[in-house]
Image (cartoon, rainbow, N blue to C red):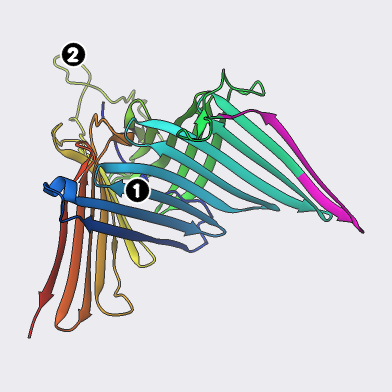
Amino acid sequence: MKRALVLSLICVLGLGFSSLAASLTGFWDTDVTIDPQQTSFAAALSLTSTISVTYTVGDWAFTSVTGLTEDGWASQAFSAGGVLGAFSISSGLVFDPNVPEFSSWYVDTSVSIAGVSFGAVFTLYPEDVKLVLSADGSAGDVVIDVDVTFGHVTYIAAGAEGGPVAGDGCDLDWAGISIGIDFPFCCADIAATLVFDCSGFDSITFATTGIAIPNLPWLTLNASVKFDLIDGKTVTLSPVLDFGDIVCFDLDIDWGSDGGVNAPLVFSDLVINGISLECDIGAVTFTGVTDFTAAEDEYFEWYTIETNDDGCCGPFSFDLGFYFLEGGAKLFDIALIDANMELQIASQFTFNMGLKVNVQTEAFTQWTVGFYVTW
């Protein structure tokens, strides 16, 4: 099954209006510890690395946080926060990338009306749900604070692992929710649909329409990408034909197949082997490439972000790439994470570092630290 492109970085989501400026920011924090007393290189080396990417547009910020260790891809979380009318909203979505499985999702919203603050916190775990409604206010010396809790989440006893344990099923007679978000990203208008059911995260789909093909004004493409925990990441490309008004002759035009004598006229097959997107968001360039012709043992798709401007202390560059393998065993079919940076500290000295994590083998495969000196 073909999987593919439209967004985002596993780590990039967006929301806003086309007239608002957007920015792409983040950090890469890495610590490597070497224990010389160990007898093997694998035991002597430990790694902790965090990659955070934030897409900000208008009053909203969307963040992806990826955690890496010497054992590979360790954690993945997404969060969003912003203002919608009079409401302040924040939300977070957590995955275990190794199983892979959904861990938790929460939505926290609040609003102040006539001096009274109202809030709601919704939390979803696999097969368990909890809702807390709150209100607080004051009248003179009287302060009132009310919390109403629906549903339940049980926890492992102290001293054990700690964390949520699935209950007997969803509470509140709750069956699921579908959230639709429309936002601009680069040169396209994206429609996102986020779906949860009683077991937790079901899928998120990004779709766009009207992809133009140069010199073919009668043909456009609709594209959608669906992320879920079972099929990984799947893509759908759909042609939209518009031959204009029929004059004089009434033609029955269809996207046909090869024919012969007394068969429909077929001009030829139109094959689209891939799709890509590149744009500048602030000082960062985002690139997404999908190649449907890649063999099964090659990466058929990759998203990268890289600098396109100098840093404050001298020439600085970095690139961060997420590579996808069709039918991969990890979360959303991510197979390789590749990060590199270079900083010219002085005119005679340049420092560089690179890190590659093979998600399929659950280990980082290459860590490089280097420098270049001239005199």
Image quadrant containing the N terminus: top left
Looking at the rendered structure, the kind of residue marked 2 is: Asn
Q: Residue 67 carries which label?
A: 1
Q: How crowded is mark 2: few (under 14 residues within 10 Å), some or many (20 or more)?
A: few
State whether residue 272 is above or below residue 346: above
Decide which of tag 1 and tag 2 comes sooner along the chain: 1
The residue carrying mark 2 is 262
Q: Nearer the viewer, residue 90 or 255?
A: 90
Identify the magenta region: 135-154
Q: In this view, does 29 lie to the left or right of 340?
A: right
Position of residue 330 measured from the top left corner of the image (x, y, whole percent): 29, 33
Q: In this view, does 306 lie to the left or right of 103?
A: left
Position of residue 336 measured from the top left corner of the image (x, y, whole percent): 22, 44
Res. 276 visible in picture: yes
Looking at the rendered structure, the kind of residue marked 1 is: Gly
State whether residue 196 is above or below residue 32: above
Kindly give the residue lying farthest to the front in the view shown: 37
SS at mark 1 in the image: strand
Q: Residue at x 20, y 15 (%)?
A: 263
Q: Residue at x 59, y 22 (%)?
A: 170
